[in-house]
Image (cartoon, rainbow, N blue to C red):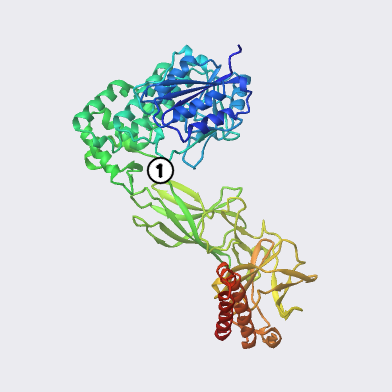
Amino acid sequence: MTPPDVSVVIPVYNSVSYVDDAIQSVVDQTIAAMRVEILVVDDGSTDGSGAVIAQRAAVDSRIRVITQKNSGTPGGARNPALDIACGAFVFFLDSDDLLAPEALEAMVDVAIAEESDVVLGKIASSDHRPVPSSMFKRTNLDADLVKDRVFNTLGPTKLIRRDIIERLRLRFPTDQTVGEDEPFMAAVYLNARKISVLADRDYYIVQYRHDGGNMTLTKRNSASHALVAQRVASVIETYTEPGDFRDGLLRRPFDRPLARALDPRWLKMSETEQTALAADLRSTIGHLYTDGLRRLLRAETQIKLDLLTAGELDALATYIAFLNDGVEKPILWENGDFRMRLPETVSALTDPSLRVVPAPPITCRLEDVSVNGKAVTVSASVTIPLLAAEPDAIFVRARLRGAHDVLDFTETSRDSGSTTAPFFVVATGVEMPRGIWDLFVVVRFGDEETERRLGADRSRTIEPDGVSNADDAPEAKDRVLAYFTQGRGNLSVDCGAILHKQFALARVAGLTLDEDGRGIVLVETTRAPRPADEYFCYVDGVPQHGGRRLLPATQLGERLVGLRLPEAAEVDGATLTITALLGGVKTSLPITATDYWNARAAGFELSPGKAGRVTVVLDEKTRAAQRKRSRTVQWHRLRSSRAAQAVRRTPVLGRAADRIARGTWRRAS
C-alpha cells in the first residue's frame, strides 16, 4: 500500500465543541483523499470528545484514533501519533483550530516541488486575535531563519518532513504544559535544508475558545517562562556555532520568554526561589549572553540581564518594580546621549555606557498653515512621549526639492511640552526663492538633528486643497501655494508656479435665478472652464446642513459658468462662502451684486456680509410653506410607522385613534 503524503496529527483534550469542525476541515481538503492520513489522539477527554472522534472514525477509514490517559501536556498527546505516522510529511493541527480547504494540497505540492523540509502557511484568526505575521509579508520559497523572521514563530502548526523528526529522534517534552513546542520546532528549523513560506492566502485559522481552554492563554510563572528560554537556547547552542547567526536566533528566547520570566511574575517568588532560579539561569545559558547578543536585545531586557548575571538580585527586583509602576518618560538626554532612566540604586550598579539607547520616537502634526503675500506661516505640534527632557531646539525647515538648499523658518512662538502635552512651534518663511520646497520639523539635541516630514498628519480644520496668495492676483513669479503632495499628503510650497502652471483666477459677475427659482451665481474665469475645475460652498450656522459642499457648475459661455446655490429652504439663516479650485489652486469668490437680487421672485433674501459672504433669509410666505411641507412629511412618517399601522389595523379602536390623531395634528399645525 502506498504511504500517504501527509499525516495530520490532532491532539484532543476536552474539545467537544471544536474537534468535529477541526476534523471536518481536514476531510474537506482539496488534496486527494489517499494522500492523507488523520491521526487523532484522545488525551483522556471527559467532555464527550471521544464519542465525536469515534463517530468520525466510523465513517472515514483514514482516521486512526489513539486513546490514552491524560498526559497533562500537548506534547504528551502528539508523541504517540508520531510513533505511528506513515506520511512523508507531518502536519500538526490543534483540535480547536481549522485548516483552509486548499491548505494541505498547496503546502505538500510546494514541499515536493521545492524539496522543502518545512512549509509555513499564513496564519489567520477567526476573531482578530493577534497571530504571528512578520514572516508572512510575502511568499518566499527559500526563506532565511533570521532575515525573513521565520524563527519568530516556533509553534508546530507547520508542514514538516517526517525524516527530520525521525533522524533527530525528536519528540515533544512531556514535563512542560506550555512552550513545549518551541524547542521541538527550533530543532526542526535548524536541521532543515530548505524552508518555504506561503503568504498568498490564509492557510491555518486560529480560533479563540470561549471556555478559556486555549493553552496559549494559560497563565505562566517565572520558572515556566525561564524553562522555555533555557531549552530553546540549548537547542540553538547545539546546532550552531558562536557568531552573528547564533546571536540572531538567541534574540528570541532571551527577549521573549526570558524577558517575561523577569517581569512582575519575578516579584511573586520568594527571595530563596529568586536566588535558585537566577543561579540556574546563569549556569545554563549565562555564557550565551554575549556582547553581540546584548546589542540585539531591548534596552529593558539588557538592564535586567546585566543585573541578573552580576548577581544583583535586589537591584533587579527594584528595577522590575520600577517598570511595573508605569514610567511615563523612561528616556533621558544626558551628556550627549539618550539613556535609560533608572532608579538611583540601579543606576549606581550600571555602566553609563551600557544605558545608551536609540533616540526616542518623534511625531509631528501640522496644526495650521497660511500664506500672506510671499510669506508662509506654519504651526506644528511635536510629541516625544518617551523623553523626560526638552530638546535643545525645535524649528521648521524648508528643503529645496532636487537640491541641497535649505531654509530654516523664523520662529515666532514656541510652547514647551508638559508631562502629557506636546511641544508647539509657530514659524514663518519669508521671501522663499523660486522652487518647490518640502517642509520638515527639525528636533535638535546637541549637534544631532532629527527631521520629520510635515503635513501627512494634520488638523481637520486645514483645507485639503492647501492655501495660496491667489486672492491677491499676483504675477506668476510671485505666486505662492502651500499644497499637499499626492500619496502621503505631505506639505510642500510651490514658489513661482512651477508645478501649478494652470493657475487661473475667477470672479463673481452677478446673481440670477434658474427656471425653478433656485439661486445661480455667475462666475467669470481668466481661461476656459476645464473638467477638473471645482467650486465649493461653505455653509455656516445651520448644523444639519453645514460644512463644505461641491456646487454643481454649468458652462454658460467661453469663460462663464453658473453655480447653483444650495436650496434656500435647507439653509435658511445660514451664511454662505464660495471658493474656486482652478488648476489645483484655491481662490475665494466674494459674492457680489446682492443689491440687484430679486428677493420677491426668489422667496428669499441674500443679505451681504464681510469678505463676500451672504446670509440666506427666507421671506415669511416661503417660510410658512416650508413649515407646512415639513409637517406633512412628519405626518406621513408617523402614519407609516409600524406602531401606527398596528393601531390602525385594530377594529373600531384603530379608526377612532386615527381620527383623533388627525384632529390633534391639525390643531397643533
For residue 607, say whether it is visible. Answer: no
Using the image, determine if residue 536 lies above or below residue 144: below
- Quarter the C terminus occupies: bottom right
Q: Position of residue 466 (x, y in %)?
A: 59, 62
- Which sits in the foreground, 154 or 361? 154
Q: Amino acid at mark 1?
A: Ala
**Residue 597 placement, left or right of 88:** right
Q: Which residue is mark 1?
A: 359
- Which sits in the foreground, 131 or 233? 131
Element assignment for label 1: loop
- Which sits in the foreground, 590 or 640? 640
Q: Position of residue 147 (x, y in %)?
A: 50, 29
Using the image, determine if residue 369 lies above or below residue 336: below
- Quarter the N terminus occupies: top right
Look at 60% across and 65% down and name the residue there: 468
For residue 80, say whether it is visible. Answer: yes
Q: Which image quadrant for residue 348?
A: top left
**Residue 282 placement, left or right of 606:** left
Using the image, determine if residue 276 lies above or below residue 500: above
| View extreme (right): residue | 558
**Residue 186 placement, left or right of 587:** left
Look at 58% across and 14% down and name the residue there: 3
Look at 45% across and 33% down and name the residue there: 16
Q: Position of residue 472 (x, y in %)?
A: 63, 71
| View extreme (front): residue | 651
Q: Residues within 10 Å of mark 1 (few under 14, many from 20)?
A: some
Q: Position of residue 570 (x, y in %)?
A: 62, 76
Q: Which image quadrant for residue 474?
A: bottom right
